[in-house]
Amino acid sequence: MCDDMENGLTVIHANSQFVVIDKPAGLLSVPGRGPDKQDCVVRRVQQQFPGCPEQPAVHRLDMDTSGLIILARTDQAHRELSRLFAHRRVHKTYFAILDGVILDTQGVIELAFRLDPENRPRQIHDPVHGKLGTTSWRRISIQDGKTWMEFIPVTGRTHQLRLHAAHELGLGCPIVGDRLYGTRKPGQRMLLHAAQLRFVHPQTGEPVEFISEVPFF
């Protein structure tokens, strides 16, 4: 395990097969469209770890989300890690603060949604054409009219936790600072953090776990 900082990135773990980065909020995971959207985790990791594949990311975090993200250092590792994510063999835990009070203590949300092409990148609920997203959640506490939450996504849809929190058929309570599904005050960040990744190492067969401290709890 390591905790080095270079190129503005905190490296939680690095080996010959993959690296685990603690991504700051506000940084893209992968390059976007246009020259002003090329700075991202992928570009910085490729600079710090020469020889990475052209597309090393095996999953993504929204730009406004902070926390753990894995990038492969070889093509084989990319295939193996991508397979783990595709088959839902990576256990992920997120923490968030919701802008309101949730009275129930735990539950499971199942909502189908898809991209709204007229309002990219916003996702909209669509039980007919959308892809089903499933999220387990647990209330941690209520403080000052806001709810501290733990989310465990079963699927990995775009904006899944953000939409499941905000939509009236989900929790009906957006994540604090969510500029797409809630409101954001000037200078505020979205309070959603990918805090834990747990899976079986595809080469050694040993269970591995990576943890990032939640910066806003």
Image (spheres, rainbow, N blue to C red):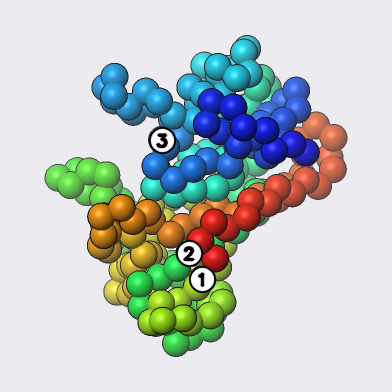
- Determine whether, in the image, residue 79 is placed left or right of residue 193: right
Residue 94: x and y in percent read 55, 59
Q: Secondary structure at mark 2?
A: strand
Q: Give the residue at x 27% y 59%.
A: 184
Q: Is residue 110 above or below residue 128?
A: below
Which of the marked residues, 1 or 3, is nearer the chain's N terminus? Answer: 3
Toward the bottom, the furthest residue is 103
- Determine whether, in the image, residue 148 is placed left or right of residue 185: right
Q: Is residue 185 above or below residue 207?
A: below
Q: Give the residue at x 52% y 41%.
A: 23
Q: For mark 1, what is the residue?
A: 149
Query: Distance from label 1 to label 2 (Cα)?
Result: 5 Å
Which of the marked residues, 1 or 2, is nearer the chain's N terminus? Answer: 2
Q: Give the residue at x 63% y 51%.
A: 212
Instruction: Answer whether labels 1 and 2 touch (C-beta < 8 Å).
Output: yes
Q: Quadrant of the C terminus?
A: bottom right
**Quarter of the rendering containing residue 49:** top right
Residue 146: x and y in percent read 41, 77
Toward the left, the furthest residue is 118
Q: Give the residue at x 55% y 17%.
A: 47
Q: Amino acid at mark 1?
A: Met
Q: For mark 2, what is the residue?
A: 96
Q: Could you classify mark 1 by the number of other residues whose Cα lies within 10 Å: few (under 14), some (14-19), or many (20 or more)?
A: many
In the foreground, 131 or 68: 68
Q: Could you classify mark 2 by the number of other residues whose Cα lies within 10 Å: few (under 14), some (14-19), or many (20 or more)?
A: many
Q: For mark 3, what is the residue?
A: 28
In the foreground, 154 or 187: 187
Residue 24: x and y in percent read 49, 43
